[in-house]
Every structure is written in C-alpha cells, then in structure tokens.
Amino acid sequence: MTLNASLVRIAGTGEVSLAPPGTPEPPDATTPLTAAWTGLGLTTSDGVTVSRKVEKDGTESWQMLSPARYIYKSQEFTVKSVFQETKAAVLGAYFGGITFAPTASGSKIYRAEFSSIPRSDVRALCVDWVDQVSDTEVFHHRLYVPRAEVSDTDDAQWSRTQENRWGMTFSALSPTGTTTTLAVWLTDDPAVLLTPPTQTSGGGS
C-alpha cells in the first residue's frame, strides 16, 4: 500500500466566477482574474460539486456475455453550487440572463422582465479554490470552462428563517472550432503529477 496523508486536499475557500463566453483561459491558478470576470460571491458551506457522467452502452453478442466494446452516447460535465448573495450577477444567471433597470431616469425602483420564450445564456466559468495546509504549503486550483450554461436550478425559497439561496447547476457545452477541450484544470499543486518533483530539504551543506 502507498499511503500519504500529506496528499489529502481540502478546498478551504473559493469562489465561482462568470464571464462572457470565449473569455480566454487564465494563464495560471494564482493570477487574479481580469475585469471580464464577475464573482458570484458567498455560497453555502457545501461549496461546489463537480460531476462528470459518461453514458455508454456495451455491445451484445450471441457468443459472449461481456461486451466486446462500448458505444459512447453522451458526456455531461457539471458544476453545482448554492449561492447566498442576491445581486445582479447571481440573479442574471439564475433567471436566464434577466437584467434590472430603473423604471425611469433617476428612479430608485428597478424592474426586470421574464420572457415567455427561454433563450440561451452561455457563459465562461471559473471555479477557484485554495488549500492552505501551512504557512509554507498553499495550493491553488482553478477550473476553467470556456462555454457553460445553467442547465438546472433549485427551487428558491424566500422566508424569514433562512437567507435567500440560489442553487444552480452549470453544464459545460461543446467547444467551438476545432478544439476538443471541454474544461481545463490549472494548479500549482505538484501532487497532481505522476512523478512529483523531489523536495530539497533545508539546512547547510
């Protein structure tokens, strides 16, 4: 057995951000996102749930009980979180791109319309999270999805016993052009390498 407790990772803190579709991939996991990105703010303590599902059917043969090969039918890559801030970026994503505007010039009453015809609302998505193991061990992770759309929303309950919550599931969409990249994971954590670099111990020679 190969057991290494130092490789246990905890997403101590993080945030989900959105940008216009096609916003370029960030250069690394630590550089602050550009002004094109808008953070969705606080979430419940459950954080973010990332899911990958591949649907496939096995071939059936008269002579064999086991499939000779699999036929791939679909792939789904999703990011789910429950947001706690009631603001433009969150409401726009939850309600399919709605925007609020003053009812008149200088008015402090803001109005948004819900269309009877749903429309596509494609965004680029980033999930950032940090694991601070110690003062000298801090690992950054960033998941980048070039094209994503809200595929499911939780019921929003408004009550006096709980903050407003906006649960959303973002599904990655097929890439455009010739690329096959559905999502990108950027990190400075050497544990993800098949052969992590050797750490040099401190001290004089």
Image (tube, rainbow, N blue to C red):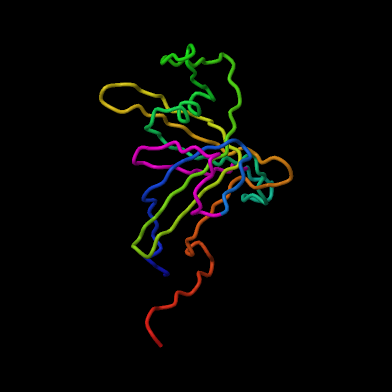
Q: Position of residue 151 (x, y in %)?
A: 54, 31
Whether residue 34 sits left or right of residue 43 in the image: it is right
> Which of the 4 quarters of the picture holds residue 134?
bottom left
Whether residue 148 sits left or right of residue 59 in the image: it is left
Q: Position of residue 37 (x, y in %)?
A: 52, 39
> Which of the 4 quarters of the picture holds residue 149?
top right
- Identified at 60% across, 22% down, the residue is 119
- Identified at 42% across, 69% down, the residue is 2
Which quarter shows the N terminus? bottom left
Report the front residue among 77 and 45: 45
For this orientation, the residue located farthest to the front is 106
Q: Position of residue 110 (x, y in %)?
A: 44, 16
- Identified at 26% across, 22% down, the residue is 160
Q: Position of residue 5 (x, y in %)?
A: 36, 65
Report the front residue among 6 and 88: 88
Extent of the magenta region: 28-56
Q: Is residue 144 magenta?
A: no
For this orientation, the residue located farthest to the top is 104
Above or below, 72 against 121 in this view is below
Above or below, 16 against 161 in this view is below
Report the front residue among 35 and 163: 35
Q: How many marks?
A: 0
Which quarter shows the C terminus? bottom left
Above or below, 170 against 179 in this view is above
